[in-house]
Image (spheres, coloured by chain):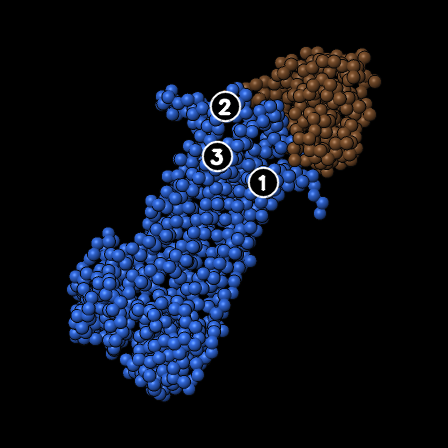
Chain colours: A blue, B brown
Amino acid sequence: MAFSSLDRKGLRDLWGMKGQAGAIALVLASGVATFAMSVSTLDTLKVSQADFYRGFAFADVFAQLKRAPESVALRIAEIPGVDRLETRVMAAATLDLPDYEYPVSGQIVSMPERLNRLYLRRGREPDPTRDNEVLLHEAFAIAHGFQPGDSLAAIINGRWRRLRVVGIALSPEFIYQLAPGAQIPDFKSFGILWMPRKPLATAYDVDGAFNSLSLTLAADARADDVIANLDDLLARYGGLGAFSREDQISHRFLAEEFKQLENMATMFPLIFLGVAAFLLNVVVGRLVATQREQVAILKAFGYSNAAVVLHYIKMIVVVVVAGSALGIALGMWLGQGLSAMYVEFYRFPRLIYHLRPEVGVIAVVISAAAAVAGTVFSVARAAALPPAEAMQPAKPPKYRRSVIELLGLGRRLAQPTRMIIRNIERRPVKSLLSVVGISFACAILVLGGFFRDSFDFMIDVQFRVSQLEDLSVTLVDATSAHALYSLASMDGVQHVEPYRSVPARLRFEHRTYRTAVQGMMPGGRLRRLLDAELRPIDLPTEGVILTDHLAGLLGIHPGDMLTVEVLEGNRPVRQVPVAGVVSEWVGVSAYMQLPALNRMMREGRAISGAHMAADEDRQLGLFAELKRIPRVAGASVRMKSLRDFYEIMARQVLVFALVNTLMAGTIAVGIVYNSARISLSERARELASLRVLGLTRGEISYILLGELALLTVVSLPLGCAIGAGLSQLMIEGLQTDLYRVPLVISPWTYSFSATVVCVAAFFSALLVRRKLDHLDLVAVLKTKE
Amino acid sequence: MTQEQTAVFSARALEKIYDMGEVQVQALRGVDLDLFASEFTVLLGPSGSGKSTLLNILGGLDRATRGTVRYLDRDLSQATERELTEYRRHYVGFVFQFYNLIPSLTARENVAVVTEIARAPMKPEEALALVGLSDRLDHFPSQLSGGQQQRVAIARAVAKNPAVLLCDEPTGALDSETGILVLEALDKINRELGTTTAVITHNSDIAMMADRVVHLSDGHIVSTERNSSKKRPRELHW
């Protein structure tokens, strides 16, 4: 297709303002890239998860029990709705790694055959006839640098055994490798291992029996019915309550993280894209307005309004398409990088990068709509004037004394300063749009940074005010509180506080939630519940305290009776009054005083473990000693978990936030630069006239750039306020069972955002100043506007 | 040249009031004017006399506040926006004081912008040859002198074979020597193509090359005279 002369004009004009067009394209690209990156990352993780589940037969229902003879499996298989069934053995173990002093616990699972099959990343499957060969989960293997051929020791059922690593594997059941009951993953101190069933059963004393099972459902089966039947059947074998996929730990955490990512992936980019689109609309509108004279000439030649509008739309579409294409390419690149980073956390055999075509389409449509709207509006306004009038310089705008001058403050202001103030006052809409534009640039920077602040604050409160223990010990079974004395007498232990953790299904009306009821010592120093003002509160002597998020999920209020269906022992069902709620950010728990929980369980002074404070320099010796106590199932170190968690978080959410900050920075620079450039072209003639009248370069720069500086200064507090508002909006979408993020924005984030905008303004001013210095006085005066 | 020619344009009782925000400016105060086919008319008057306003209204760039303008059998004063666009596209060629070339297009392309939408245009090269710019086809406006730019503007105006050529101070921004080159181009087009031409100027010397001179002052036509002996542009001095 041949280009018309008009098209050629459009292309050359675009090239002529490539700086500005480039800045607009970059703003757009940033918005589109954030959108494409977020959505494609989420889709990639979801598609990869679905692919893994499908290809490796992830089960629908799971159950743990004390021990049942293999013959029970036949009866389970007859439960209506059960499709495929697989029994297995799972054993908790304490691991003893060479050169690693900290406590490590593990879960050893018998090799699956049909369900939850393993993806063998390296090495080979263990030989079923050997009793010492294992596969390691990839996350754990990488954390410790294990290779096939290495060995480690495990204490299974109180007996020390040496194991040989023959391979590294992944499982759809443990995409997210998390220790039972843990709130944050710690790949170093917890690992999944697989071993042939026969030697594992022998070691764990469940030969000819099973203590765990998983099954898939027939197409029309209801999970709840199957679970109810299963629970009935397994009750006499010490069943701990069957649960569906939704409560399976890896799946649930993945689902929660996906939910959160989804909120981030839609809200962040939509806000970004929305802001970019708005700014684009303003910038393009002003840019086209400076073409007023050319519009008039084209009309004088007999081009119709529609033809002129179309001409400018074509120009802007070129910019939109270029910006969007760049944005999508950038978004894909970032999305692949981000997905790959998530894979350190979520272990998939392969990552299937997925970018839905409609993501690109949506991005382009939103940007194009904004840009075209800005164009049409401005061109239509320019075209509405009779050409003769449009070719004249715009009629002298009505200036008047500004409010500041009328207030009598004007006498102290120099003439150029008065010009600045009058100019802003005379065009309040334009000034307002500039302020809104720069404010939004500042606001999305705040939005990019607040997540880190909130997260820091949340972690800080959780682990420095609420959970103060140095380490926690989990005992194999609920044990008499006498065990405390032996723990307390260990070398280096300063303080011991027992706790009891009872797995339970909480029920109110028709709503249920599976969690654990935590029994805590009244007046404890190591674990404290906090009220909304972060003051420690006392547990009531009777009744249960719920996390506010959990109370919300159950729809229960203080004073209501909560049904607690205990999932261990003889599985009592009890009614407990809700005594209150606490606002906790991490996890979903129910709390009772330890004696009250013991009474509810109709047991003696039983405990599940203890939180301990210990001398820092004696902790290592303590761990070694703990490993030798048979009843200790595991120990965890708070600061270490915290540090490891931080490392992972730093590489994930924070990188996500960093990318957003970069994109926000680009948008800020693009907008500020364009505002400055457009002001220059709008006022070049006026400023040149002033130069002719004898004003210095410095003086005219002051008039133009002083206005920019004033508008920027006004924009900063407004931008911070808008940023806080957007963050609040954003945070509503980030509430998950995993954690609820409090809205915290640090002064650092505010000042960083403001600084980026100021730096952008400064460099834009420098560029404009250079143009001002080269203003061609004669040429400007000779031609009309 | 016979006296009883057809009037291409006829304006009656034209008034134009500009609303300049706080003040109103009456640019035309009842103007009656006829322009005849193939005639070269100069509208002469000091600045503020209303001559540009008159020209703009004749060219369909602006509307009169009161009165009528007819182009042949079209009533421009009643025309819609669409009809005015159509009228400008096919019948009128404009030449402006400040050339108003499109800076991002070459000489040839500046002419092509108009020929591409015209009904029976000349080739851009042809039009530029007419104004003596065959060797400047691919130059951008910034690479041309003022006189050359104005001649490109004339080529652009005549390339569509307009019924009327309207020129607003075509030599206003030029020195006399360059101005004469421009006037020669206009004269040549008027003679060779017979294009009805109206030139407005405040330079009374230019009036000597016209068939007819219309004097304007303060929004009125004060007198009209016919040159008994037209001068060639070469013979003019100012």
For residue A47, side relative to residue A615 (left or right): right
The answer to whether residue A9 shows anywhere in this view is yes
Q: Secondary structure at mark 3?
A: helix
| Residue at numbered disc 2 | A696
Q: Residue furthest right?
A: B1
Q: Residue at x 42, y 52 (%)?
A: A657
| Residue in the foreground of this view, choosing between A670 and B143 | B143
Q: Which mark is residue B183?
A: none
| Residue in the foreground of this view, choosing between B8 and A452 | A452
Image coords of residue A104 (percent x, y): 32, 71
Q: Nearer the viewer, mark 1 or mark 2?
A: 2
Image coords of residue B54 (percent x, y): 66, 21
| Residue in the foreground of this view, choosing between A319 and A369 | A319
| Residue at numbered disc 1 | A18
Image coords of residue B83 (percent x, y): 67, 33
Q: Nearer the viewer, mark 1 or mark 3?
A: 3
Image coords of residue A716 (percent x, y): 39, 39
Answer few, some or many: residues within 10 Å of disc 2's Cα (few below 14, many 20 plus, some between 14 and 19). Answer: few
Q: Secondary structure at mark 2?
A: loop
The answer to whether residue B75 shows anywhere in this view is no
Q: Which mark is residue A765?
A: 3
